[in-house]
Image (tube, rainbow, N blue to C red):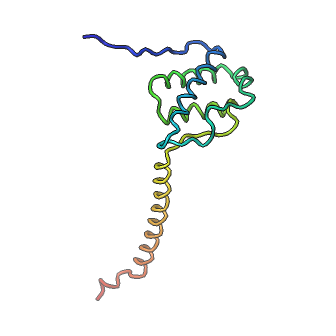
Amino acid sequence: METTAKNTQKIEGHKVTDLKSATEKALKLISQMDSHKYKASGDVTKPSPKADKAFADMGICDRRRLRRILNELEGHLTLAKANKLLRLLERTGVHETKIRIDEPKHTAIQLKRCKMVAAKKAYEAALAEYKAEKGDYYKNK
């Protein structure tokens, strides 16, 4: 019985050029996610004008985080991993604007849930008022 190993190339070092090229490749993959199911709130592939300086000024911890996120993206691209990369790039200055990939159906469900919670609170308040008014009126007859 043979086992097959994934044929992915992991990023090993902290060189700026390696991280920058891997980030560009990952952003191209993420931009392909922008379809009928997922929508991006900005241009994913367009870095800020100061992106080269932001990569150079990145500390060792941020480089490690970036390398770890890029290696995770090599395995399986998910919405959470894509947003994690975009948040890190926005925080370090590679992207100036906040970009988030979202699923429109998820957003619609969350809005309806907020309405439902508000209606439930109103119902519970009305029920408490009713019980206070009623008291033990029907028990004493």
Residue at far bottom of view: 141
The answer to which image quadrant residue 61 occupies is: top right
**Count of all numbered marks drawn on residues in the image:** 0
Q: In the shown orientation, is residue 65 left or right of residue 55?
A: left
Q: In the shown orientation, is residue 104 left or right of residue 51?
A: left
Choose between 112 and 31: the one closer to the eye: 31
Choose between 134 and 108: the one closer to the eye: 108
The answer to which image quadrant residue 58 occupies is: top right
Q: Position of residue 98 (x, y in %)?
A: 65, 40
Q: Position of residue 136 (x, y in %)?
A: 35, 81
Residue 18, relative to residue 30: is it above or below?
Answer: above
Residue 27, relative to residue 40: is it above or below?
Answer: above
Q: Position of residue 35 (x, y in %)?
A: 50, 40
Residue at far left of view: 1
Q: In the shown orientation, is residue 1 left or right of residue 100?
A: left
Q: Quadrant of the N terminus?
A: top left
Choose between 58 and 38: the one closer to the eye: 38
* Residue sitting at x 46%, y 57%: 113
* Residue sitting at x 62%, y 39%: 99
* Residue sitting at x 64%, y 30%: 89
Q: In the shown orientation, is residue 63 left or right of residue 124?
A: right
* Residue sitting at x 55%, y 40%: 101
Q: Quadrant of the C terminus?
A: bottom left
Q: Position of residue 36 (x, y in %)?
A: 48, 43
